[in-house]
């Protein structure tokens, strides 16, 4: 069952000396990243006061923890492990407790490194030499970034041990009996690991399956003999730990049982439905896992089985979800451009909070609350991973590129390998990345500059006076006149209020959608330019928090959109805590509208379309000034970052394709020379 073919040995040639040098440099850089992440995790844990870190470790060594409790294990503080786990750890002495936090954290890091090394060596064959050399640092870095590992380090959890034992049994130890021993030990610590026994059995390793089941039974019986009361509590009164520790309907419980409880189902109906769904998931997942194991993709088979265990376990807390991260090894999609969708989605789900993945709208709460469970279920029963016998496994449909456009400058493009792709990017990946990038933008924008306290507000107002005085010196301080003029004309005031609130997001997204569907080459150019501009704007928000005219005391501006406000504590309803009102310089309202205008003028085929494109930034400029939401210089700043965004796109990728063909409804395009 273990992979015995590990390509990419030291003796294999890779190409030219330059290529070898680049590979060595990349490998060193990746190992450096892994080391930096490890040090960062260590620092984050060990520099936190002892009462706020390793809180789950207190379950074992705290004053009322397992080591000191005289009655039942489950009389201690939030202990949820198996009786065998308590039996193993209880012999720890008081002498070890002083240094246990430090040693536990370092030991956990070593386990993570071992896990990454084993996973890297277990990649389905064949793999290129580049992949074999770079896989280990990449795997370790992803593990360090993942929420399960971060939680295990922070809380002092033991959840990495069962995963490591399973991987050791499947890929490292020799002999079926030893493999079964590892599996049985892992199951004694985490009972749902027993789902791997059928995987061993149906893939021909029946001795290992019997050894694993026997080891689990023996260790559980040993714990039952030593701790009969605790065993009754765990196995009979709280089946497999259900009800111990946190509530089963808590958001952290990413299992089918937890999801059904959160949907409001209770009692016999919920239990019956959970058992039926769990059985169906187990059968479907094991059939897929056996098929992929026989196909030579054992690591993928292990990941699928682990994802099924996540779903069917009565309680699966976040630190127990490492199985999903192993599923990145599966290959999905026939096109080369689609290959990154699944691994990127898994990495994002495993490293970012669910609120960053999905919008904060009530209609999506159920999906957001169970996002990791949905991903695990998809990996277990739905995602169509390619078989190694598929012609697309090693050679997907290649990506076609537009002909390079000569640049005026010798060093342009700075990154020549970022060529203009002719085909549409994967829509799911685009939507996912746009959502995550926007969530990150919103968080940084909120954190940038003034935070709403007195000192931050004073800084923003001081910057506002600087901008106001500068505009008066330049004789461009038209905001007050325009604001009061528009406020006195009802229909004009309503128009600019509506325009300010409505078109900021709608029009850029519409432009991107049209370009995605009709002109994918230009879509990538426009999207990259917009991304650069937005990133530069975030730097401006951070370095120069600025009060807009409507929040400047003593200047007499009218807030036409929100109404009169207490400038010390403005109230914008639900958005008050979600927006930074002092992120005014540069104005992205004007910047994004100018981006829309430039893109439309550059690409629209009709003169009237170009005229409308120019009209939008003009109307937006009038709206942000008339509503007292921005200064004139804010708009200048918006124009600067947009210009810089287009310039950076030019420098990085070179000139825009001279002729970007439009796609028809069937996705066909005119023939274009490629290289």
Image (cartoon, rainbow, N blue to C red):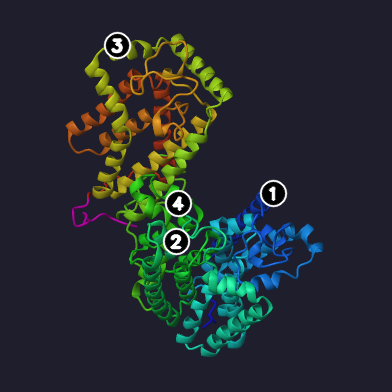
| Spatial separation of the CA atoms under disc 3 and disc 1 | 59 Å
Residue 515 coordinates in the image, percent (x, y): 27, 45
Above/below status of 290 relative to 624: below
Please tell me how crowded label 2 is: few (under 14), some (14-19), or many (20+) other residues with Cα within 10 Å: many
Magenta region: 663-675
Q: For residue 485, which numbered disc appears in the image?
A: 3
- Lower position in the chain sequence, tag 4 or tag 2: 2
Residue 217 coordinates in the image, percent (x, y): 59, 83
Above/below status of 569 relative to 143: above
Q: For residue 354, which numbered disc appears in the image?
A: 4
Q: Mark 1 points at which residue?
A: 51
- Lower position in the chain sequence, tag 4 or tag 1: 1
Predominant SS along the magenta part:
loop
Question: Which secondary structure lies at badge 1?
Answer: helix
Instruction: Compare residues 356 and 410 and report the one nearer the observer.
Output: 356
Residue 75 coordinates in the image, percent (x, y): 65, 63
Residue, x 34% and y 55% (percent of image)?
428
Please tell me how crowded label 4 is: few (under 14), some (14-19), or many (20+) other residues with Cα within 10 Å: some
Q: Are marks 2 and 3 in contact (CB under 8 Å)?
A: no
Q: For residue 258, which numbered disc appears in the image?
A: 2
In the rendered image, which quarter contains the C terminus?
Answer: bottom left
Please tell me how crowded label 3 is: few (under 14), some (14-19), or many (20+) other residues with Cα within 10 Å: few
- Lower position in the chain sequence, tag 4 or tag 3: 4
Q: Does the magenta stretch include residue 674?
A: yes
Residue, x 55% and y 84% (percent of image)?
213
| Spatial separation of the CA atoms under disc 1 and disc 2 | 29 Å
């Amino acid at each position: 069952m273990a992979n015995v073919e590990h390509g990419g040995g030291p003796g294999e040639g890779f190409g030219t000396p330059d290529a070898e040098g680049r590979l060595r440099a990349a490998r060193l850089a990746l190992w450096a990243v892994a080391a930096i992440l490890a040090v960062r995790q260590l620092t984050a844990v060990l520099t936190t006061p002892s009462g706020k870190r390793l809180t789950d470790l207190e379950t074992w060594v705290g004053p009322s923890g397992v080591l000191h409790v005289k009655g039942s294990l489950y009389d201690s503080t939030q202990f949820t492990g198996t009786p065998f786990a308590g039996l193993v750890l209880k012999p720890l002495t008081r002498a070890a407790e002083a240094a246990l936090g430090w040693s536990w954290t370092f030991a956990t890091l070593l386990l993570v490194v071992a896990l990454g090394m084993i996973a890297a060596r277990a990649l389905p064959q064949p793999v290129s030499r580049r992949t074999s050399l770079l896989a280990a640092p990449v795997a370790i870095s992803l593990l360090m970034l993942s929420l399960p590992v971060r939680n295990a380090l922070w809380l002092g959890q033991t959840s990495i041990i069962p995963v490591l034992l399973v991987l050791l049994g499947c890929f490292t130890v020799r002999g079926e009996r030893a493999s079964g021993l590892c599996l049985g030990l892992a199951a004694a610590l985490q009972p749902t690991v027993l789902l791997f026994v059928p995987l061993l059995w149906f893939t021909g390793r029946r001795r290992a399956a019997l050894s694993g089941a026997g080891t689990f039974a023996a260790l559980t019986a040993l714990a039952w003999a030593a701790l009969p009361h605790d065993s009754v509590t765990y196995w009979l009164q709280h089946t497999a730990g259900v009800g111990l520790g946190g509530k089963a309907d808590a958001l952290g419980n990413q299992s089918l049982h937890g999801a059904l409880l959160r949907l409001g189902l209770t009692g016999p109906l919920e239990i019956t439905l959970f058992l039926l769904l769990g059985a169906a998931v187990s059968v479907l997942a094991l059939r897929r896992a056996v098929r992929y194991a026989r196909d030579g993709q054992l690591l993928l088979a292990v990941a699928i089985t682990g994802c099924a265990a996540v779903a069917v376990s009565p309680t699966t807390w976040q630190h127990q979800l490492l199985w999903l991260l192993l599923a990145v090894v599966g290959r999905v999609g026939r096109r080369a451009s689609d290959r990154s969708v699944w691994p990127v989605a898994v990495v994002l789900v495993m490293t970012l909070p669910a609120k960053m993945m999905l919008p904060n709208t009530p209609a999506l709460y159920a999906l957001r609350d169970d996002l990791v469970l949905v991903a695990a279920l998809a990996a277990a029963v739905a995602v169509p991973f390619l078989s190694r016998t598929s012609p697309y496994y090693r050679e997907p449909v290649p990506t076609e590129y537009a002909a390079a456009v000569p640049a005026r400058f010798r060093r342009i493009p700075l990154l020549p390998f970022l060529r203009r792709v002719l085909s549409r990017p994967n829509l799911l990946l685009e939507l996912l990345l746009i959502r995550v990038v926007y969530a990150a933008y919103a968080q940084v924008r909120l954190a940038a500059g003034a935070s709403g306290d007195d000192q931050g507000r004073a800084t923003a107002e001081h910057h506002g006076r600087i901008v106001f005085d500068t505009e008066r010196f330049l004789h461009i301080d038209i905001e007050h006149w325009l604001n009061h003029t528009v406020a006195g004309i009802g229909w004009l005031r309503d128009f600019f209020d509506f325009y300010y609130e409505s078109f900021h997001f709608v029009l850029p997204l519409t432009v991107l959608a049209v370009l995605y569907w009709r002109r994918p080459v230009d879509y990538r150019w426009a999207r990259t330019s917009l991304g650069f501009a937005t990133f530069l704007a975030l730097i401006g928000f951070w370095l120069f928090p600025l009060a807009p005219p409507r929040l400047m005391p003593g200047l007499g501006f009218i807030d036409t959109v929100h109404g009169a406000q207490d400038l010390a504590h403005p109230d914008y309803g639900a958005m008050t805590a979600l927006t930074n009102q002092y992120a005014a310089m540069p104005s992205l309202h004007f910047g994004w509208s100018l981006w829309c205008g430039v893109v439309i003028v550059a690409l629209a085929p009709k003169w009237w379309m170009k005229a409308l494109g120019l009209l939008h930034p003009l109307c937006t400029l009038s709206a942000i000034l008339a509503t007292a939401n921005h200064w004139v210089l804010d708009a200048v700043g918006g124009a600067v970052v947009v210009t810089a965004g287009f310039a950076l796109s030019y420098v990085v990728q070179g000139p825009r394709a001279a002729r970007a063909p439009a796609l028809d409804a069937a996705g066909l395009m005119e023939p274009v020379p490629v290289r």
